[in-house]
Amino acid sequence: MITFAAAMKIGDIEFGERPVFLAPMEDVTDIGFRLLCKRFGAAMVYTEFVSAEALIRDVKSTISKLTISDEERPVGIQIYGRDVEAMVEAAKMVEQAGPDLIDLNFGCPVKKVAGKGAGAGMLQNIPKMLEITRKVVDAVSLPVTVKTRLGWNHEQLIITTLAEQLQDCGIQALTIHGRTRSQMYTGTADWTLIGEVKRNPRIHIPIIGNGDITSAEEASRAFDTYGVDAVMIGRATFGCPWIFKEVRDSLDHRDTESLDFNAKLDILEELLRINVERMEKNLRAGESKTAGMKRGILHTRRHLAATPIFKSIPNFRQTRIAMLRAETADDLLGILEQVRKQLG
């Protein structure tokens, strides 16, 4: 078993022992979902990742991602891009939004990002990655952190060397997803290299482990076996913000009552209402409240499709289809209430 520091800090931000973070995810970690995850014990949350190019072009949908609430602090804003000047300018704009830290995304594997040289695409251009990192660190006063992967592919597992190089650029924490870019989200996350980075005596910044944390047991194993300073949960949070309560209760050895089906359904219904209300308040020019409501429903559908609470219900396929086709909030709430009654 590996020993680790009793408490974690990024800059002046204190997280306590064994903190659990919400990963930044596009079309997932909007403010409503972040607030729910924070309520259930997420020590740190991040916005959806922000395109530096879109930000400096003043694209409204991108600007809106910078909206944060004091209730969700500490909160980070993550940016991505391939151009040094654009990343520096975007970081300065992000700083004005008032997050607690700025995270640089060098890990997104999707083709529209990595294929253009940004995100995990930076793993093929380490000199530029390091230049971006140094210049962003120099340009802002907030803590700067990085999220990346093990390497581009299994022939280029560079993270142990890269971690030292990024630390030398002045970052104050490093998140490592235990996959290569070529793996995308397939296969199994390899934590051995994450542990190797953490054990490196030359590494003094916090190391945050990410990849395949789907339960309290896996979170405990990540801390105990690999000695990471924090774990970050991504896809397992879809439709399941209470996973932070389950993990936190286990890590803190709290014997608290688990949430039942009705309580979890209440949370998903609350998420729907939050999303609809937020979208109706942020209408684009010429749009009606109906358009805002539909976008709020779309933001919630991903969670309803992925939530584990429906997986054990027999013959649920038609209900799931109806749920994902609902066009009004009242229709969707009605379907959810029917499910509640059937199981009651």
Image (cartoon, grey):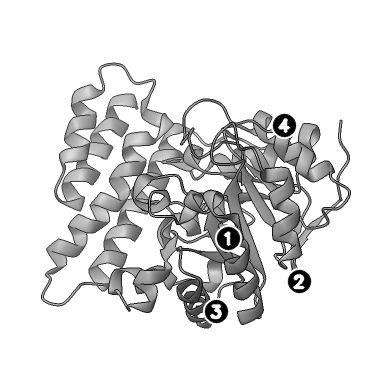
The kind of residue on which mark 2 rests is Asp
Q: Relative to 96, say whether 224 is above or below.
A: above
Task: Identify the disc placed on residue 192.
Answer: 4
Q: Position of residue 158 (x, y in %)?
A: 66, 43
Would you say the residues marked 4 and 1 are in contact, meaning their CB atoms lie under 8 Å apart?
no
The kind of residue on which mark 1 rests is Met
Residue holding disc 1: 129
Secondary structure under badge 3? helix
Would you say the residues marked 1 and 3 are in contact, meaning their CB atoms lie under 8 Å apart?
no
Residue at left offset 27%, top offset 38%: 336
The kind of residue on which mark 4 rests is Thr
Q: Quadrant of the C terminus?
A: top left
How far is disc 1 from disc 2 in space, using C-alphas? 25 Å
Within 10 Å of disc 2 (Cα), the crowding (few <14, some 14-19, many 20+) is few
How far is disc 1 from disc 3 in space, using C-alphas? 20 Å
Q: Quadrant of the N terminus?
A: top right
Asked whether 239 or 149 is in front, the reply is 149
**Mark 1 vs mark 2: which is more N-terminal?**
2
Residue at left offset 31%, top offset 48%: 300
Task: Identify the disc placed on residue 12.
Answer: 2
Asked whether 262 or 234 is in front, the reply is 234
Task: Identify the disc placed on residue 95.
Answer: 3
How far is disc 4 from disc 2 in space, using C-alphas? 29 Å
**Mark 1 vs mark 3: which is more N-terminal?**
3
Secondary structure under badge 2? loop
How far is disc 4 from disc 1 in space, using C-alphas? 24 Å
